[in-house]
Image (cartoon, coloured by chain):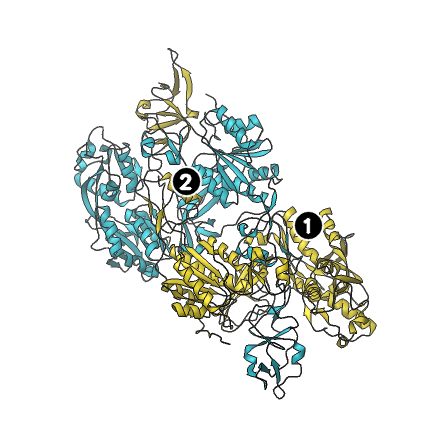
Chain colours: A cyan, B yellow
Amino acid sequence: MQRSVYLKLVSPAEALRTLLDAFAASPLKPEAIPLSQAHGRVLAEAATARLSSPAFHGAAMDGVAVAAEETFGASERRPKVLRLGEKAHWINTGHILPRGCNAVIMVEHLVPGKDASGHETVTIEKAAFPWQHVRKLGEDIVATEIVLPPGALIGPYQLGALAAAGITHPVVFAKPKVAIIPSGSELVPLEEATEEILGQGEKLPEFNGLVLAAMVREAGGEPAVRPIVPDREEELRRALLEAVESDADLVVINAGSSAGSEDYTAGVIAGLGDLLVHGISMMPGKPTAFGSVRGKPVLGIPGYPVSAILAFEELGQPLLAAWMGRSMPEPGVEQAVFPQDIPSRPGMEEFIRVKLGLVNGNFIAVPLPRGAGTVSSLSRAEGILRLPADSEGLSAGSRSPVRLIKSARDIAGSLLAIGSHDNTLDILDSLLRKHYPGRSFTSSNVGSLGGLMALREGRCHLAGSHLLSEDGEYNKDAVRRHLSGFPVQLMRLVDREQGFIVPPGNPRSITSLHDLTQTGLRFVNRQRGSGTRVLLDFHLKRLGLSSGSIAGYEDEEYTHMQIAAAVLSGRADVGLGVKSAAVALKLDFVPFAVEEYDLVIPMRYWEDKRIQDLAALARSDVFRKVVLDMGGYSVDRSGELVWTFPG
Amino acid sequence: MQRSVYLKLVSPAEALRTLLDAFAASPLKPEAIPLSQAHGRVLAEAATARLSSPAFHGAAMDGVAVAAEETFGASERRPKVLRLGEKAHWINTGHILPRGCNAVIMVEHLVPGKDASGHETVTIEKAAFPWQHVRKLGEDIVATEIVLPPGALIGPYQLGALAAAGITHPVVFAKPKVAIIPSGSELVPLEEATEEILGQGEKLPEFNGLVLAAMVREAGGEPAVRPIVPDREEELRRALLEAVESDADLVVINAGSSAGSEDYTAGVIAGLGDLLVHGISMMPGKPTAFGSVRGKPVLGIPGYPVSAILAFEELGQPLLAAWMGRSMPEPGVEQAVFPQDIPSRPGMEEFIRVKLGLVNGNFIAVPLPRGAGTVSSLSRAEGILRLPADSEGLSAGSRSPVRLIKSARDIAGSLLAIGSHDNTLDILDSLLRKHYPGRSFTSSNVGSLGGLMALREGRCHLAGSHLLSEDGEYNKDAVRRHLSGFPVQLMRLVDREQGFIVPPGNPRSITSLHDLTQTGLRFVNRQRGSGTRVLLDFHLKRLGLSSGSIAGYEDEEYTHMQIAAAVLSGRADVGLGVKSAAVALKLDFVPFAVEEYDLVIPMRYWEDKRIQDLAALARSDVFRKVVLDMGGYSVDRSGELVWTFPG
């Protein structure tokens, strides 16, 4: 087998500079288009006014238009009477001054009447000065002036200014055309990816094309997703040549840019033209390559969705922007506190996706999974931390700037929960957004104990907890032990059934903890500090069973759903979790215990409008109905204050 | 004549609350659409995963897939040899694990070879543990989990997450449909607004429809601009009824909402339904009205472009966002210093458009014209100051938060010039943007003297100046007098001809300042502190002419182009200005003096990259050619350092 080798790794900044230098000449032709189609386009040259705005003298007030000279000498003692239609003309704001007029007298300063011959008149008691209450020709824009510079993005304001200046056909850049080649023998088009086909376990749906096309559109370009190319060097070469010979200004090959045995992208670029960069010191996104084929830029980006997106954000979008003389839009940045250690990968610039909360005036950043395949880590991300290549990581409690994806205002309207995971937390978020506009709920799953620690350190607004103490009571003992001096309220969210999640039909006949010690059986556990782990250990101890007797006790997952997924996939024969997770994946469930799942809320937030909205929602019929439908829950006390801990 | 009367003025916040309360029920129906069409749409309900992602166990590294159990016991001393295709399978990152395998061994930890029978093998020296280097089923998303909450805007990241979760037909809100009715007898459609028609002086092009349609699209809606309705009550009523009976969710009547004699909007809404608000304490935008007709919201917004835009931003866009369960995007905000007094209008919330520069670490805000008709004040705006209704205005030097329109980074790349106006400054900006990406040039025209004051107070990076002193020299004397202790460099931008701007053919035969005292002649002057005014006064004094002998000496404009516009429109018979302004408007020009127009640059900025880029541009052939083509300039010393003032 052959594997290509990375050229020297270069930094993201160096890679971008290399790309922009190599393709500095914009291939985009200027074109004059009707203004009605110009929204979202970018000016290729300065737009100079064809007309002045206003194009004529116009009234700036409602009243009558006059020649100021006709009013000279008017006073309270010697008012002047002007005949309407002759020396004075009714006029409304914005309308064109009649010929011969050079001033407007406000309606409040007039007395309408009739003269002896019955002709309508106005009487004025004060002279008008020339050009009073008149919008003069060219007051806004004078013909031939530059209205907008080249590189200006035409939004609503710009449409108005161009129209006012008589520029009905602005000269804009042709939209950059981007050909996207998905490659990979395992891929099927998204619309053909039926469950039958995927169920055979050999095919994956191709959707990076859709994602990249959207990114091209957001950068003002026109994407064309070409047919999927299998992992065969010759076919990739042919597909690349076809794309380069098309009208595309930029060609993107998605996947095959790594160093795997079927990663032909870098080699194919090198074979047909010049390979400029192969390998960028960024994570995700390292296996990125680009070069020049027949003078056109060809970008080879990795197949993992997060890598593909970040690589295109770092290179593709800035190239399109540069061709249009634009800089990239700039996200907001806030200093955020990291409650957990963030280890770094030396020599790599890392893009760490985080959730954010505004707690006690501090932005708190909770990291999402780092994997390049976890596209949900981007769709759920509220910010991105860029950890420089020379960083040694962040230690818990340190601060670092984070680029905001969610706006600071939306973050401020959101509650941040750190602690135990329960599926009803996601329900809370969805229902809050729907029924309490401006509210949302972000949760980070670190287990019950971690939640209490985070509360105490002021790093979240509330914590979900279900910690069983030796006296068989939930939460109170743990709160007393870990939050002394820190007054909190306990609000019940749900009572829930915990039990054994097993394959349909319960083939191993699991009914008790003793059954977990069967030979050949594999268990999947929750992480240390989680309430479910505490529950397991509590009962193992009571029964005198050793954890060593359970195969898989050390195999840990972080959520109930991942426990269920492990059972569904055959990775494990049984796990301990909530009924809703088993029901969701159509697995069987053997009840084991009913737990009290509480939200632990610092006293100082109890009256916070966000908490009160949350409590109202937890008591609502809509929440109760959705939760009961999930199975395994009791909602009799949902939203109830169950205990006050004075600290 | 009849005039409608405003209902009680309400604040913008109160108006919005009234609108959102009255139309709280979203009229938008949820619809399932193919994912390929979902970019930019908004989820109407929570999207729950149909598939897990990954849907199968997959390789997280390049190498071989194995069943971990087959490797148990392998060590350096007792390596294991696995036959390829039987116990080990080559696999690339991201690919699906073959059935029976549960671990991946990295390519770096393998030795390929052949066994005695010639079968290909790999040799391993370390046992694999189960699930090592495997992306487990559901690691990212587990089927049935909530992938995105309702109200989520579907961008590229979200497309990826939806596709990964097998959601091929997300349920989104139908796009809100907005009917826009332009009204006004003076309006002609933009595409019919030929110069012949406009030249008759009675018609204005209708373009607010285009602007509002773009604003609707940016808010995720679908606009329909309906035919122009003349200012006749009955026709407006009919047009409104038709629009309300169409599929529109919101109807916007543009103009006619004021209290003028032909402003029927409020009355028509009241006649057909309920008028909820008429008159909002905002400036521009006061004459805004809205109500309910047949249960649909009808928004009557003013005709001035700036008023129309701001009224729709305050009311229309938030209503559409609320219907989709979204909050409005939040602009960046920075504290900015206001170098000039900003008077307030008591009782009105004012929207003051500003240009911005980052000088010495401070954002400096220079106000643009306030008029509601100056649409260029929006298209040129880099920020907006909202001055609350109870504000007493800002005094020079005070700070206030400004919403950014231009990004902070783009502002940081820009040079802020305050001082004298010259048309070549606009050329500098256009050429800088084109040839020096990331650079731009913002100029505020307050006259030469005002520029030196602004420099001294640290409120700009440079100042254009052409101040003639009594000894007949330019700029040096003024710099010595006003910038003592403040070292600067003088860079020549251009030498330029000043002269009399007169109508074609010079009908008044102006050849000298004496001619300005002709009976019946009207002059138009530049403002106090401008170099052109200083030039005029210098020569008047030398000739012993009194300013009182010149009719129109008190009639002031702020730019050369506005002087030319005043002559073009017949408002004045003559003005003093630069040749390029006369040439631009095809007026005649009688040369009077050649001036030295310099850029005054503080020593501390002289080495600044932005200044050096500017100087390089001023010396470039492209700048010189464009300037020479304008007429009236000499560029022999452009970009040259002409004088150093040590302070």
Separation (CA) of disc 1 from disc 2: 43 Å
**Label 1: which residue?**
B612
Disc 1 crowd, CA 10 A, few/some/many (<14, 14-19, 20+): some
Asked if the residues shown at circle 1 and circle 2 are in contact, with their CB atoms under 8 angstroms apart, the answer is no
Q: Locate residue A191, reporting x and y percent.
A: 38, 36
> Quick one: SS at disc 2?
loop
Image quarter of residue A271: top right
Q: Locate residue B533, reporting x and y percent.
A: 73, 68
Q: Locate residue B30, reporting x and y percent.
A: 35, 50
Query: Mark 1 is on which residue type?
Result: Gln
Is residue A109 visible in the rendered image? The answer is yes
Is B618 above or below relative to B391? above
Is A591 above or below relative to A464? above
Say which chain tag 1 marks: B
**Label 2: which residue?**
A370
Is residue B361 visible in the rendered image? The answer is no
> Quick one: SS at disc 1?
helix
User: At 26% across and 54% down in the image, what residue appears?
Assistant: A622
